[in-house]
Image: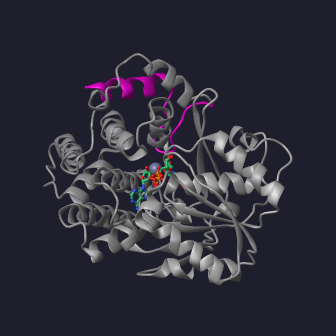
Amino acid sequence: MKNFTYVNTTKIIFGKDTENLVGEEIKSFGGKKVLFHYGGGSIKKSGLYERIIKSLKDSHIDYIELGGVQPNPRLSLVRSGVELCKKHNIDFILAVGGGSVIDSAKAIGIGAVYDGDVWDFFSGKATINTTIPVGVILTIPAAGSEASTGTVITNEYGWYKWSVNSVIIRPKFAILNPELTYTLPAYQIACGASDMVAHVFERYFTNESGVDFTDELCEATIRSIMRSVKMVLNNPTDYEARANLMWEGTLAHNGILGTGRIEDWASHKIEHELSAIYDIAHGAGLAIIFPHWMEYVYKHDIYRFARFSHRIFNVDVDFFNLEATVLEGIKRLKKFYQEIGLPTKLRDVNIGNERLKEMAEKATINGPIGGFVKLTTDDVYNIYKMALE
Ligand code: NZQ
Ligand code: ZN
Protein backbone atom coordinates (compact mmCIF):
# COMPACT_ATOMS: atom_id res chain seq x y z
CA MET A 1 0.00 0.00 0.00
CA LYS A 2 1.27 3.44 -0.92
CA ASN A 3 1.72 6.24 1.61
CA PHE A 4 -1.18 8.67 1.49
CA THR A 5 -2.72 11.76 3.02
CA TYR A 6 -6.48 11.90 3.00
CA VAL A 7 -8.36 15.07 3.86
CA ASN A 8 -12.05 15.48 3.16
CA THR A 9 -13.62 18.54 4.65
CA THR A 10 -16.99 18.43 2.90
CA LYS A 11 -19.73 18.48 5.53
CA ILE A 12 -22.48 16.05 4.51
CA ILE A 13 -26.03 16.90 5.55
CA PHE A 14 -28.17 13.93 4.61
CA GLY A 15 -31.89 13.23 4.64
CA LYS A 16 -35.43 14.50 4.19
CA ASP A 17 -36.11 18.26 4.19
CA THR A 18 -32.42 19.12 4.64
CA GLU A 19 -32.51 21.67 1.79
CA ASN A 20 -34.35 23.99 4.17
CA LEU A 21 -31.14 24.30 6.19
CA VAL A 22 -29.22 25.85 3.31
CA GLY A 23 -29.44 29.48 4.43
CA GLU A 24 -28.08 28.72 7.89
CA GLU A 25 -25.33 26.51 6.47
CA ILE A 26 -24.13 29.24 4.13
CA LYS A 27 -24.13 31.66 7.04
CA SER A 28 -22.09 29.27 9.17
CA PHE A 29 -19.41 29.32 6.44
CA GLY A 30 -19.39 33.11 6.38
CA GLY A 31 -21.43 33.58 3.20
CA LYS A 32 -23.25 36.93 2.95
CA LYS A 33 -23.51 37.56 -0.77
CA VAL A 34 -24.24 34.41 -2.74
CA LEU A 35 -24.21 33.36 -6.38
CA PHE A 36 -27.14 30.91 -6.67
CA HIS A 37 -26.16 28.67 -9.59
CA TYR A 38 -28.42 26.07 -11.22
CA GLY A 39 -29.24 24.21 -14.42
CA GLY A 40 -31.92 24.16 -17.04
CA GLY A 41 -35.08 24.35 -15.00
CA SER A 42 -35.73 21.06 -13.17
CA ILE A 43 -35.45 22.85 -9.82
CA LYS A 44 -38.19 25.29 -10.81
CA LYS A 45 -40.53 22.52 -11.96
CA SER A 46 -40.05 20.56 -8.74
CA GLY A 47 -40.60 23.52 -6.39
CA LEU A 48 -37.09 23.24 -4.92
CA TYR A 49 -36.25 26.72 -6.21
CA GLU A 50 -38.90 28.40 -4.00
CA ARG A 51 -37.77 26.50 -0.90
CA ILE A 52 -34.18 27.64 -1.44
CA ILE A 53 -35.20 31.28 -1.92
CA LYS A 54 -37.21 31.09 1.31
CA SER A 55 -34.31 29.63 3.25
CA LEU A 56 -31.92 32.29 1.91
CA LYS A 57 -34.35 35.07 2.78
CA ASP A 58 -35.07 33.65 6.24
CA SER A 59 -31.33 33.74 6.91
CA HIS A 60 -31.03 37.31 5.51
CA ILE A 61 -28.65 36.23 2.77
CA ASP A 62 -28.28 38.46 -0.24
CA TYR A 63 -28.06 36.57 -3.56
CA ILE A 64 -27.94 36.87 -7.30
CA GLU A 65 -28.88 34.06 -9.67
CA LEU A 66 -27.18 32.39 -12.59
CA GLY A 67 -29.18 29.52 -14.11
CA GLY A 68 -28.79 27.77 -17.45
CA VAL A 69 -25.96 25.31 -16.82
CA GLN A 70 -26.12 22.63 -19.54
CA PRO A 71 -25.06 19.01 -19.09
CA ASN A 72 -21.36 18.94 -20.08
CA PRO A 73 -21.06 22.46 -18.64
CA ARG A 74 -19.71 25.14 -20.93
CA LEU A 75 -16.78 27.50 -20.48
CA SER A 76 -18.77 30.50 -21.75
CA LEU A 77 -21.23 30.31 -18.84
CA VAL A 78 -18.34 29.84 -16.40
CA ARG A 79 -16.82 33.05 -17.74
CA SER A 80 -20.15 34.87 -17.26
CA GLY A 81 -20.27 33.58 -13.67
CA VAL A 82 -16.73 34.80 -13.03
CA GLU A 83 -17.71 38.28 -14.25
CA LEU A 84 -20.81 38.31 -12.03
CA CYS A 85 -18.80 37.28 -8.95
CA LYS A 86 -16.23 39.99 -9.55
CA LYS A 87 -18.84 42.66 -10.21
CA HIS A 88 -21.04 41.86 -7.20
CA ASN A 89 -18.33 40.90 -4.68
CA ILE A 90 -19.75 37.42 -4.27
CA ASP A 91 -18.32 35.56 -1.25
CA PHE A 92 -20.09 32.18 -1.57
CA ILE A 93 -21.42 30.06 -4.45
CA LEU A 94 -24.42 27.78 -4.02
CA ALA A 95 -24.67 25.03 -6.65
CA VAL A 96 -28.06 23.34 -6.92
CA GLY A 97 -28.13 20.41 -9.32
CA GLY A 98 -25.82 17.64 -10.48
CA GLY A 99 -22.21 17.31 -11.55
CA SER A 100 -22.59 19.87 -14.32
CA VAL A 101 -23.84 22.65 -12.06
CA ILE A 102 -21.37 21.80 -9.30
CA ASP A 103 -18.43 21.70 -11.71
CA SER A 104 -19.49 25.01 -13.22
CA ALA A 105 -19.69 26.50 -9.70
CA LYS A 106 -16.23 25.17 -8.79
CA ALA A 107 -14.76 26.67 -11.96
CA ILE A 108 -16.43 30.01 -11.30
CA GLY A 109 -15.06 29.89 -7.75
CA ILE A 110 -11.43 29.61 -8.90
CA GLY A 111 -11.86 31.98 -11.83
CA ALA A 112 -13.34 34.74 -9.70
CA VAL A 113 -10.22 35.09 -7.56
CA TYR A 114 -7.80 34.98 -10.50
CA ASP A 115 -6.74 37.82 -12.79
CA GLY A 116 -6.25 35.74 -15.94
CA ASP A 117 -8.71 33.57 -17.89
CA VAL A 118 -10.28 30.67 -15.95
CA TRP A 119 -9.35 28.18 -18.73
CA ASP A 120 -5.71 28.61 -17.65
CA PHE A 121 -6.42 26.23 -14.75
CA PHE A 122 -7.66 23.54 -17.14
CA SER A 123 -4.88 23.97 -19.69
CA GLY A 124 -2.24 23.75 -16.96
CA LYS A 125 -1.10 27.37 -17.23
CA ALA A 126 -2.23 28.23 -13.69
CA THR A 127 -2.51 26.30 -10.42
CA ILE A 128 -5.30 26.56 -7.91
CA ASN A 129 -4.29 28.45 -4.77
CA THR A 130 -7.63 29.68 -3.52
CA THR A 131 -11.34 29.81 -4.36
CA ILE A 132 -14.62 31.36 -3.41
CA PRO A 133 -16.20 28.64 -1.24
CA VAL A 134 -18.88 26.45 -2.82
CA GLY A 135 -21.84 24.72 -1.15
CA VAL A 136 -24.08 22.14 -2.83
CA ILE A 137 -27.66 20.93 -2.87
CA LEU A 138 -27.47 17.72 -4.90
CA THR A 139 -30.40 16.71 -7.13
CA ILE A 140 -28.91 13.73 -9.00
CA PRO A 141 -26.71 11.00 -7.57
CA ALA A 142 -24.03 10.47 -10.19
CA ALA A 143 -20.80 12.41 -10.66
CA GLY A 144 -19.80 12.62 -6.99
CA SER A 145 -18.69 16.21 -7.55
CA GLU A 146 -20.47 17.19 -4.31
CA ALA A 147 -17.47 15.89 -2.35
CA SER A 148 -14.79 15.48 -5.00
CA THR A 149 -11.65 17.44 -5.78
CA GLY A 150 -12.41 17.81 -9.49
CA THR A 151 -14.23 19.98 -11.98
CA VAL A 152 -14.73 19.10 -15.65
CA ILE A 153 -15.56 21.86 -18.12
CA THR A 154 -16.26 21.81 -21.84
CA ASN A 155 -14.48 24.49 -23.83
CA GLU A 156 -16.84 24.98 -26.77
CA TYR A 157 -14.12 26.83 -28.69
CA GLY A 158 -12.58 23.61 -30.01
CA TRP A 159 -14.69 21.17 -27.94
CA TYR A 160 -12.16 20.24 -25.32
CA LYS A 161 -13.57 18.64 -22.15
CA TRP A 162 -10.85 18.93 -19.56
CA SER A 163 -10.61 18.64 -15.80
CA VAL A 164 -8.60 20.11 -12.99
CA ASN A 165 -8.21 18.73 -9.47
CA SER A 166 -7.38 20.23 -6.10
CA VAL A 167 -8.52 19.65 -2.52
CA ILE A 168 -9.07 23.42 -2.40
CA ILE A 169 -12.21 23.08 -4.55
CA ARG A 170 -13.95 20.42 -2.49
CA PRO A 171 -17.34 21.90 -1.56
CA LYS A 172 -17.74 23.18 2.00
CA PHE A 173 -21.01 21.33 2.45
CA ALA A 174 -23.25 19.03 0.47
CA ILE A 175 -26.95 18.71 1.22
CA LEU A 176 -28.21 15.29 0.13
CA ASN A 177 -31.97 14.79 0.28
CA PRO A 178 -32.88 11.56 -1.56
CA GLU A 179 -36.43 12.84 -2.11
CA LEU A 180 -35.08 15.55 -4.41
CA THR A 181 -34.13 12.79 -6.86
CA TYR A 182 -37.71 11.48 -7.31
CA THR A 183 -38.24 13.68 -10.38
CA LEU A 184 -35.29 12.24 -12.32
CA PRO A 185 -35.99 10.51 -15.64
CA ALA A 186 -35.03 6.80 -15.67
CA TYR A 187 -32.27 7.42 -18.20
CA GLN A 188 -30.55 9.98 -15.96
CA ILE A 189 -30.78 7.61 -13.00
CA ALA A 190 -29.10 4.89 -15.05
CA CYS A 191 -26.42 7.26 -16.36
CA GLY A 192 -25.72 8.31 -12.78
CA ALA A 193 -25.29 4.72 -11.61
CA SER A 194 -22.97 3.99 -14.54
CA ASP A 195 -20.79 6.96 -13.57
CA MET A 196 -20.62 5.76 -9.95
CA VAL A 197 -19.62 2.24 -10.98
CA ALA A 198 -16.98 3.73 -13.27
CA HIS A 199 -15.54 5.84 -10.45
CA VAL A 200 -14.96 2.68 -8.48
CA PHE A 201 -13.51 0.75 -11.44
CA GLU A 202 -11.02 3.56 -12.06
CA ARG A 203 -9.68 2.91 -8.56
CA TYR A 204 -10.17 -0.85 -8.40
CA PHE A 205 -7.94 -1.57 -11.40
CA THR A 206 -4.55 -0.84 -9.92
CA ASN A 207 -1.10 -2.40 -9.93
CA GLU A 208 -0.76 -1.84 -6.21
CA SER A 209 -0.64 -4.91 -3.95
CA GLY A 210 -1.52 -5.11 -0.26
CA VAL A 211 -4.70 -3.06 -0.67
CA ASP A 212 -7.18 -5.79 0.24
CA PHE A 213 -9.25 -3.50 2.43
CA THR A 214 -9.95 -0.95 -0.32
CA ASP A 215 -10.33 -3.77 -2.86
CA GLU A 216 -13.17 -5.18 -0.79
CA LEU A 217 -14.71 -1.76 -0.20
CA CYS A 218 -14.68 -1.26 -3.99
CA GLU A 219 -16.33 -4.61 -4.66
CA ALA A 220 -19.03 -4.03 -2.06
CA THR A 221 -19.69 -0.51 -3.36
CA ILE A 222 -20.16 -1.68 -6.95
CA ARG A 223 -22.46 -4.55 -5.92
CA SER A 224 -24.46 -2.15 -3.81
CA ILE A 225 -24.80 0.46 -6.59
CA MET A 226 -26.00 -2.21 -9.02
CA ARG A 227 -28.60 -3.40 -6.50
CA SER A 228 -29.81 0.09 -5.55
CA VAL A 229 -30.23 1.36 -9.10
CA LYS A 230 -32.39 -1.60 -10.05
CA MET A 231 -34.53 -1.07 -6.95
CA VAL A 232 -34.93 2.62 -7.78
CA LEU A 233 -35.87 1.92 -11.39
CA ASN A 234 -38.41 -0.72 -10.30
CA ASN A 235 -39.93 1.47 -7.60
CA PRO A 236 -39.10 5.17 -8.02
CA THR A 237 -40.54 6.16 -4.62
CA ASP A 238 -38.51 3.60 -2.65
CA TYR A 239 -36.90 6.08 -0.25
CA GLU A 240 -34.35 3.65 1.17
CA ALA A 241 -33.14 2.62 -2.28
CA ARG A 242 -32.88 6.29 -3.31
CA ALA A 243 -30.99 7.05 -0.10
CA ASN A 244 -28.54 4.22 -0.61
CA LEU A 245 -27.91 5.19 -4.23
CA MET A 246 -27.27 8.79 -3.26
CA TRP A 247 -24.78 7.93 -0.55
CA GLU A 248 -23.06 5.39 -2.81
CA GLY A 249 -22.53 8.10 -5.42
CA THR A 250 -20.72 10.30 -2.93
CA LEU A 251 -18.55 7.54 -1.51
CA ALA A 252 -17.67 6.22 -4.97
CA HIS A 253 -15.84 9.46 -5.71
CA ASN A 254 -14.83 11.21 -2.50
CA GLY A 255 -11.40 9.61 -2.69
CA ILE A 256 -11.66 7.11 0.14
CA LEU A 257 -11.73 4.10 -2.23
CA GLY A 258 -8.52 5.25 -3.90
CA THR A 259 -6.45 5.56 -0.75
CA GLY A 260 -3.08 3.81 -0.88
CA ARG A 261 -3.35 2.93 -4.57
CA ILE A 262 -2.48 4.36 -7.99
CA GLU A 263 -5.70 4.89 -9.92
CA ASP A 264 -6.30 4.45 -13.66
CA TRP A 265 -8.68 7.07 -15.22
CA ALA A 266 -7.99 6.22 -18.89
CA SER A 267 -11.63 5.29 -19.51
CA HIS A 268 -12.79 8.66 -18.20
CA LYS A 269 -10.43 10.48 -20.54
CA ILE A 270 -11.59 8.32 -23.45
CA GLU A 271 -15.21 9.05 -22.54
CA HIS A 272 -14.72 12.79 -22.09
CA GLU A 273 -13.85 13.05 -25.79
CA LEU A 274 -17.19 11.45 -26.65
CA SER A 275 -19.22 13.80 -24.46
CA ALA A 276 -17.16 16.79 -25.64
CA ILE A 277 -17.76 16.16 -29.33
CA TYR A 278 -21.12 14.38 -29.36
CA ASP A 279 -22.64 15.90 -26.19
CA ILE A 280 -23.81 12.51 -24.89
CA ALA A 281 -24.37 11.91 -21.16
CA HIS A 282 -21.11 11.05 -19.39
CA GLY A 283 -22.59 7.90 -17.76
CA ALA A 284 -23.84 6.63 -21.11
CA GLY A 285 -20.41 7.13 -22.66
CA LEU A 286 -18.80 5.21 -19.80
CA ALA A 287 -21.18 2.26 -20.29
CA ILE A 288 -19.92 2.09 -23.88
CA ILE A 289 -16.22 2.52 -23.12
CA PHE A 290 -15.59 0.56 -19.92
CA PRO A 291 -16.35 -3.00 -21.12
CA HIS A 292 -14.23 -2.42 -24.24
CA TRP A 293 -11.37 -0.97 -22.20
CA MET A 294 -11.57 -4.14 -20.09
CA GLU A 295 -11.47 -6.40 -23.14
CA TYR A 296 -8.42 -4.49 -24.35
CA VAL A 297 -6.38 -4.55 -21.12
CA TYR A 298 -7.41 -7.63 -19.08
CA LYS A 299 -4.33 -9.65 -20.01
CA HIS A 300 -2.23 -7.11 -18.13
CA ASP A 301 -3.47 -8.66 -14.85
CA ILE A 302 -5.75 -11.59 -15.49
CA TYR A 303 -5.92 -12.43 -11.77
CA ARG A 304 -7.36 -9.06 -10.86
CA PHE A 305 -9.90 -9.37 -13.65
CA ALA A 306 -10.84 -12.91 -12.58
CA ARG A 307 -11.37 -11.53 -9.09
CA PHE A 308 -13.56 -8.76 -10.57
CA SER A 309 -15.70 -11.39 -12.33
CA HIS A 310 -16.00 -13.56 -9.26
CA ARG A 311 -16.43 -11.01 -6.48
CA ILE A 312 -18.61 -8.52 -8.34
CA PHE A 313 -20.50 -10.69 -10.81
CA ASN A 314 -20.48 -14.00 -9.00
CA VAL A 315 -18.86 -15.84 -11.91
CA ASP A 316 -17.60 -19.33 -10.99
CA VAL A 317 -13.83 -19.30 -11.36
CA ASP A 318 -12.58 -21.70 -14.02
CA PHE A 319 -9.06 -22.29 -12.68
CA PHE A 320 -7.95 -23.83 -15.96
CA ASN A 321 -9.37 -21.04 -18.08
CA LEU A 322 -9.15 -17.71 -16.32
CA GLU A 323 -9.71 -15.93 -19.60
CA ALA A 324 -13.19 -17.45 -19.87
CA THR A 325 -13.87 -16.32 -16.29
CA VAL A 326 -12.86 -12.77 -17.14
CA LEU A 327 -14.85 -12.61 -20.36
CA GLU A 328 -17.96 -13.87 -18.58
CA GLY A 329 -17.60 -11.04 -16.03
CA ILE A 330 -17.31 -8.44 -18.78
CA LYS A 331 -20.35 -9.95 -20.49
CA ARG A 332 -22.35 -9.62 -17.26
CA LEU A 333 -21.23 -6.00 -16.89
CA LYS A 334 -22.57 -5.23 -20.38
CA LYS A 335 -25.79 -7.03 -19.48
CA PHE A 336 -26.13 -4.87 -16.36
CA TYR A 337 -25.82 -1.69 -18.44
CA GLN A 338 -28.37 -2.98 -20.95
CA GLU A 339 -30.82 -3.97 -18.21
CA ILE A 340 -30.84 -0.43 -16.86
CA GLY A 341 -31.38 0.99 -20.33
CA LEU A 342 -27.88 2.16 -21.30
CA PRO A 343 -26.03 1.85 -24.60
CA THR A 344 -23.00 -0.44 -24.83
CA LYS A 345 -21.85 0.36 -28.37
CA LEU A 346 -21.07 3.61 -30.18
CA ARG A 347 -23.62 2.66 -32.85
CA ASP A 348 -26.32 2.65 -30.12
CA VAL A 349 -25.86 6.42 -29.83
CA ASN A 350 -25.38 6.95 -33.58
CA ILE A 351 -21.65 7.50 -33.45
CA GLY A 352 -19.72 6.14 -36.42
CA ASN A 353 -16.03 5.94 -37.18
CA GLU A 354 -15.70 9.47 -38.64
CA ARG A 355 -13.94 11.15 -35.72
CA LEU A 356 -12.37 8.25 -33.81
CA LYS A 357 -8.83 9.19 -34.81
CA GLU A 358 -9.33 12.82 -33.80
CA MET A 359 -10.74 11.77 -30.41
CA ALA A 360 -7.85 9.35 -29.80
CA GLU A 361 -5.39 12.13 -30.52
CA LYS A 362 -7.16 14.58 -28.24
CA ALA A 363 -7.41 12.04 -25.40
CA THR A 364 -3.65 11.52 -25.48
CA ILE A 365 -2.65 15.09 -26.23
CA ASN A 366 -0.42 15.15 -23.13
CA GLY A 367 1.02 11.65 -23.69
CA PRO A 368 -0.12 8.11 -22.83
CA ILE A 369 -3.03 7.80 -20.38
CA GLY A 370 -3.89 5.38 -17.57
CA GLY A 371 -2.29 4.47 -14.26
CA PHE A 372 -3.04 0.72 -14.56
CA VAL A 373 -2.16 0.21 -18.23
CA LYS A 374 -0.56 3.04 -20.18
CA LEU A 375 -2.44 3.64 -23.42
CA THR A 376 -1.01 5.37 -26.46
CA THR A 377 -2.98 7.16 -29.17
CA ASP A 378 -3.13 3.91 -31.16
CA ASP A 379 -4.41 1.97 -28.15
CA VAL A 380 -7.17 4.51 -27.58
CA TYR A 381 -8.07 4.40 -31.25
CA ASN A 382 -8.29 0.59 -31.07
CA ILE A 383 -10.62 0.83 -28.06
CA TYR A 384 -12.91 3.27 -29.88
CA LYS A 385 -12.94 0.90 -32.87
CA MET A 386 -13.82 -2.08 -30.65
CA ALA A 387 -16.63 0.00 -29.12
CA LEU A 388 -18.24 0.72 -32.50
CA GLU A 389 -20.30 -2.49 -32.84
O1 NZQ B 1 -30.43 21.17 -15.82
P1 NZQ B 1 -31.61 20.56 -15.17
O2 NZQ B 1 -32.90 21.09 -15.65
O3 NZQ B 1 -31.50 20.57 -13.66
O4 NZQ B 1 -31.63 19.02 -15.65
C1 NZQ B 1 -30.61 18.10 -15.32
C2 NZQ B 1 -29.77 17.67 -16.52
O5 NZQ B 1 -30.50 17.76 -17.71
C3 NZQ B 1 -31.25 16.80 -14.91
N1 NZQ B 1 -31.60 16.76 -13.50
C4 NZQ B 1 -30.75 16.89 -12.44
N2 NZQ B 1 -31.44 16.71 -11.29
C5 NZQ B 1 -32.72 16.47 -11.64
C6 NZQ B 1 -32.84 16.52 -13.04
N3 NZQ B 1 -34.01 16.30 -13.69
C7 NZQ B 1 -35.10 16.06 -12.93
N4 NZQ B 1 -35.05 15.98 -11.58
C8 NZQ B 1 -33.89 16.17 -10.90
N5 NZQ B 1 -33.86 16.05 -9.57
O6 NZQ B 1 -30.26 15.81 -15.15
C9 NZQ B 1 -29.51 16.20 -16.30
C10 NZQ B 1 -28.05 15.85 -16.07
O7 NZQ B 1 -27.46 16.67 -15.10
P2 NZQ B 1 -25.86 16.68 -14.91
O8 NZQ B 1 -25.55 17.61 -13.81
O9 NZQ B 1 -25.22 16.87 -16.22
O10 NZQ B 1 -25.59 15.17 -14.46
P3 NZQ B 1 -24.41 14.52 -13.66
O11 NZQ B 1 -24.55 14.74 -12.21
O12 NZQ B 1 -24.33 13.15 -14.17
O13 NZQ B 1 -23.09 15.35 -14.08
C11 NZQ B 1 -22.38 15.03 -15.25
C12 NZQ B 1 -21.19 15.94 -15.39
O14 NZQ B 1 -20.25 15.74 -14.31
C13 NZQ B 1 -18.97 15.49 -14.84
C14 NZQ B 1 -19.27 14.80 -16.14
O15 NZQ B 1 -18.18 14.77 -17.02
C15 NZQ B 1 -20.43 15.62 -16.66
O16 NZQ B 1 -19.97 16.80 -17.29
N6 NZQ B 1 -18.14 14.76 -13.87
C16 NZQ B 1 -17.68 15.44 -12.82
C17 NZQ B 1 -16.85 14.85 -11.87
C18 NZQ B 1 -16.30 15.61 -10.74
N7 NZQ B 1 -16.41 16.91 -10.75
O17 NZQ B 1 -15.73 15.05 -9.79
C19 NZQ B 1 -16.43 13.45 -11.99
C20 NZQ B 1 -17.16 12.67 -13.01
O18 NZQ B 1 -16.32 11.64 -13.46
C21 NZQ B 1 -17.67 13.42 -14.18
O19 NZQ B 1 -16.67 13.54 -15.18
ZN1 ZN C 1 -17.31 10.05 -14.03
Towards the viewer: 178 or 343: 178
Depicted 49 relative to depicted 345: above or below: below
Locate residue 115, reporting x and y percent: 86, 47
Locate residue 305, reporting x and y percent: 30, 48
Locate residue 359, reporting x and y percent: 49, 25
Q: Residue at x 27, y 37 (%)?
A: 344
Q: Residue at x 27, y 44 (%)?
A: 342
Q: Residue at x 26, y 60 (%)?
A: 226
Does any portion of residue 168 appear in the rendered image? yes
Depicted 238 relative to depicted 294: above or below: below
Locate residue 151, reporting x and y percent: 60, 51
**177 part of magenta stretch:** no
Does any portion of residue 211 appear in the rendered image? no
Towards the viewer: 269 or 295: 269
Image quadrant in which you'd find residue 284 = top left
**Residues rendered magenta in the picture:** 366-389
**380 part of magenta stretch:** yes
Depicted 84 relative to depicted 216: above or below: above
Q: How is the image coloured?
A: one colour
